[in-house]
């Protein structure tokens, strides 16, 4: 994976089908990449804000990801937690697609996704 002004290239990631998600290791961080059913892309840290669960081991349905541990859900349009037991929203990272690669900018928290 190459880095360019904070953007991290996830080589071949654009092959992830719509409605699928996957986790990628970027240094010490684990990034979750979501390919939404409508074709949009979202990325976040691959960790639930409620505990130590990997969100990519949960369920992606429409624009919502559900944590595998306690069923907490996040709206991937905004990162907002959707009720109990989630008290902290998910920070979404900017995403862009270049050919077969997807680039994410993990340090640009709070700017939303494209
Ligand atoms: S760890 Fe995700 S809902 Fe509890």
Image (tube, rainbow, N blue to C red):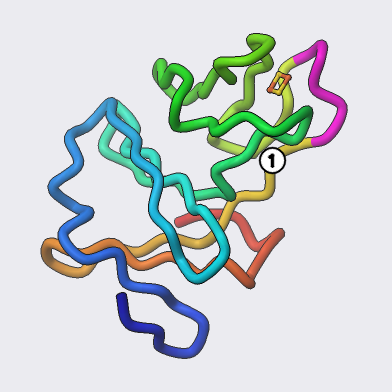
User: Where, quadrant-wise, is the C terminus in this rendering?
Assistant: bottom left
Label 1 neighbourhood size at 10 Å, few (<14), some (14-19), many (20+)? Answer: many
User: Where, quadrant-wise, is the N terminus in this rendering?
Assistant: bottom left
At 63% across and 26% down in the image, what residue appears? 74
Quadrant containing ligand 1: top right
Q: Is residue 26 a member of the stretch shown in magenta?
A: no
- Residue 16: horizontal and vertical position, in percent? 19, 41
User: Considering depth in this image, is 17 or 96 the residue closer to the camera?
Assistant: 17
For the stretch drawn in magenta, the main secondary structure is loop
Disc 1: which residue: 90
In the rendered image, is residue 63 in sight? yes
- Residue 108: horizontal and vertical position, in percent? 63, 70
Quarter of the figure with residue 101? bottom left
- Residue 89: horizontal and vertical position, in percent? 76, 36
Quarter of the figure with residue 52? top right
User: Considering depth in this image, is 98 or 48 the residue closer to the camera?
Assistant: 48
In the rendered image, is residue 97 in sight? no
Above or below, 84 against 57 in this view is above
- Residue 80: horizontal and vertical position, in percent? 71, 32
Above or below, 93 against 68 in this view is below
Magenta stretch in the rendered image: 83-88
At 51% across and 23% down in the image, what residue appears? 65
Above or below, 105 against 61 in this view is below
Q: Is residue 86 a member of the stretch shown in magenta?
A: yes
Above or below, 45 against 55 in this view is below
Tell whether 4 sits left or right of 64: left
Tell whether 85 sits left or right of 6: right
User: Considering depth in this image, is 56 or 28 the residue closer to the camera?
Assistant: 28
Residue projecting furthest to the right: 87
Q: SS at mark 1?
A: loop
Q: How many numbered tags mark residues here?
A: 1
């Amino acid at each position: 994976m190459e880095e360019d002004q904070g953007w991290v290239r996830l080589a071949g990631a654009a092959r992830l089908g719509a409605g699928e998600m996957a986790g990628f290791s970027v240094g010490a961080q684990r990034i979750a990449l979501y390919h939404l059913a409508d074709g949009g892309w979202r990325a976040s840290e691959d960790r639930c804000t409620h505990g130590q669960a990997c969100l990519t081991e949960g369920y992606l349905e429409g624009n919502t990801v559900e944590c595998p541990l306690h069923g907490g859900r996040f709206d991937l349009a905004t990162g907002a937690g959707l009720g109990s037991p989630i008290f902290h929203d998910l920070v979404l990272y900017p995403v862009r697609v270049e050919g077969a690669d997807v680039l994410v900018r993990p340090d640009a928290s709070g700017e939303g996704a494209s």
